[in-house]
Amino acid sequence: MDRLERFLYSRRNIVGSVLALAGLALHFVGIVGGLAWLPITVGLYAIGVLLVPGEPDLDIQLGAAQDAAEVRDGLSRLVRSLRGKVADDLLAKVVSIQGSILGTLEIEGKPTFGF
């Protein structure tokens, strides 16, 4: 279901759907008569789906870390891999989460005084 949902919200499907609606509009306005509207509408949808580039895939993988240094390195790689691929506000949230995790790692080795 996830794959179908991603396609339905993709730029390819949206552009194809808009072009198909334009084909239907040509029929209802009277520019395309008879049954010619059907292959024209399907063709316009296919053009939209085939010619519009897809969204870039993100490959986010965090493996198991043995120590705090590996966690720091993994988070740094993650942030670097996201730069330029996601919106700035989303990247800022990831960086904020990274800061929270790194802050937790720094506290981890210190006494908590019973808290």
Image: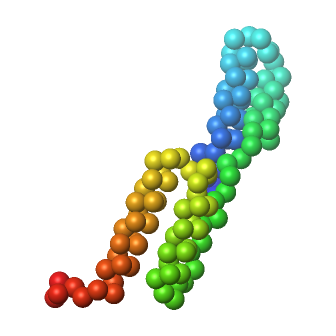
Position above or below: 10 against 23:
below
Q: Quadrant of residue 105?
A: bottom left
Task: Report the label total.
Answer: 0
Q: Quadrant of the C terminus?
A: bottom left
Of residues 59 and 8, the one nearer the viewer is 59
Q: Please give left or right for residue 20 compared with residue 51 in the image.
A: left
Q: Which x, y percent locates residue 24?
A: 70, 23
Q: Quadrant of the N terminus?
A: bottom right
Q: Please give left or right for residue 30 compared with residue 90 in the image.
A: right
* Residue at 71% across, 28% down: 19
* Residue at 75% across, 39% down: 52
Position above or below: 24 against 69:
above
Q: Which x, y percent locates residue 69?
A: 50, 81
* Residue at 68% across, 52% down: 56
Decide if residue 47 is in sight here: yes
Of residues 35 and 4, the one nearer the viewer is 4
* Residue at 61% across, 61% down: 81
